[in-house]
Amino acid sequence: MLVGGILVQVALGGVYAWSTFAAAFKSDESTLHLSALQASLPFQIAIGMIFVGTFIGGRIQDARGPRVVALAGVVIYALGIILSSFAREPGQLWLLLVGYGVLSGFGLGLAYIVPIALLQKWFPDKPALITGLAIGGFGLGAVITSPMAQVLIGNNPQTPAAAFLPLGLAYLVVGVLGAAAFKNPPSGYSVAAAHDASEPSAEAGQASSRRDFTQAEALATPQWYLLTAILTLSVMTGISLVSAAAGSAAAIAGFTAAGAATLVGVLGLFNGAGRILWAWISDRIGKMPAFVGILTIQGLCLIAIPHASAGWLFVLLAAIIYTCYGGAFGAMPSTAGAFFGVANAGSIYGLMLIAWSLGGVAGPLLSTWLIGADANYTLAFTTVGIIGVAAAILPLITKPPKRPADA
C-alpha cells in the first residue's frame, strides 16, 4: 500500500518540472516561442485545478473507495500530459492550457488526495510519518522528471512539447501500477491497530465514545478554516521562491543559467525530504509547534536570501525554504486527521487543499509583481517573508476541536 502511494505521488510530482519546459518554450529555438507570461499560464492553471480534483476526488473516495478514484486521476493526468505533446506549432498554446493546465491539474488533484487519506487508515499509529513518506514521493517526482525532460528537450529543441509524450506514457504506467494496489482496510482495522500500537490511556478511552467528523461538521468549526489559512500562507511563502528559484539564483548569487537549472533540480530533493522530516517532527513536538517552526523559519530565510550573494549561503537558505515548503504538505494531512478523524479524511482534507491553489497562485503573482522589471528581489522576498513570519501566530491560537459524540 505504501509503495503504491509513493509510485502514484512520484508520477504526479512530475508537474513541478514545468520550469524546465517553460525555459524551453521561451527559447528562440522553439517553434512556439512563448512569452514569459504565456509560458507561466499552463502551470498556474494546473495549480488552480488541483483543488477541483481534490475536492471531487475526496468525496468520491469516501463514498466509493480509493482505487477507482486514483486510477481515474492518474489516467486523466497522463492523458493531459500526452495531449500537451502535440503543441508544436505557433498558435497551439491552447493545447498546453487544456492538456497540462486543465486536464493534468484536475487529474493530479483527483489522485493526489487518495494515498494521503488512505494511508492514515492503514497506519493509524504513525499517520504523519507514513503520509510524509508518500508525499515525499511527490517531491522526488520533479527531481526525476527534470533531468529526463532536459535530455528529451535537448534531442529536439525546436519542439520541446514532444518530450511530453514519453513522459506522459511513463506517468500512466507508474501511476496505474501504484493505484492498482489501493484498497480500504477492513472494518474496525484502524481501531484495532491503534489499540495494538500503544498503551490505552484515559484520553483514548474518552475518545472511543466519540466519532469522526463529517465534512459538514468539520466545515462548521473554526479550526478547519484556521488550518486552511495556515497551509495557504505557508504555500504562499515558500512558492514565492520555488517559482523564481532559477532567476533569483542568477540575479542574487551570480549562478550561470546551467548552474541555476542544476540547483533547481537539487532543491527538489529538499522539497521531498521536508515532507518526511516535518511530518516526523510534528509527531514528536506536536502539530501546532511544528507549523510555528515551518512558518517562522521559512519566512526568516526568505527575508535573508536577497542578501545571500555568496553561492553557498544562497543554496543553504534556499534548501531550508524548500524543506519547510514541502514540510507543510507533509505535516498537514495528519494534522487534519488528528483534528477531525480519518473516516472522512478524503473529503475534509481534499477541500482543505484549496490552500494549495490559493497560495500557489497568490505567491508567484505577488512576488513577480514586486520583483518587477527592476529585479527587486529584496522587496519581493522581504514582503512575503514578513507575511510568513506574521502567519506563525495562527498555529498558536489553533486548538483541536471537540469530537462529536456518537448518536
Image (cartoon, rainbow, N blue to C red):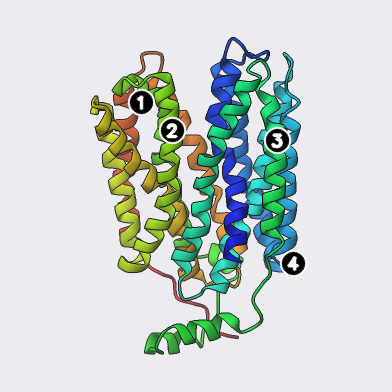
Check the picture and name the quadrant holding the C terminus.
Answer: bottom right
Which residue is more in the foreground, 301 or 358? 301
State the residue at coordinates (33%, 24%). 377
Q: Nearer the viewer, mark 2 or mark 4?
A: 2
The residue beneath circle 2 is 264
Which of the 4 quarters of the picture holds residue 281? bottom left
Say which label, 3 or 2, has the lower sequence index: 3
Tell me if mark 3 has few (under 14), some (14-19) or many (20+) residues whose alpha carbon lies within 10 angstroms of its own. some
Vertical side of 126 occupied by 364: above or below: above
Mark pair 3, 2: CA separation = 22 Å
* Circles 2, 1 touching at the beta carbon (< 8 Å): yes
Q: Residue 327, image x and y in percent?
A: 41, 52
Mark 1 element type: helix
The kind of residue on which mark 1 rests is Ala
State the residue at coordinates (37%, 67%). 283
Tell me the tag on residue 166.
3
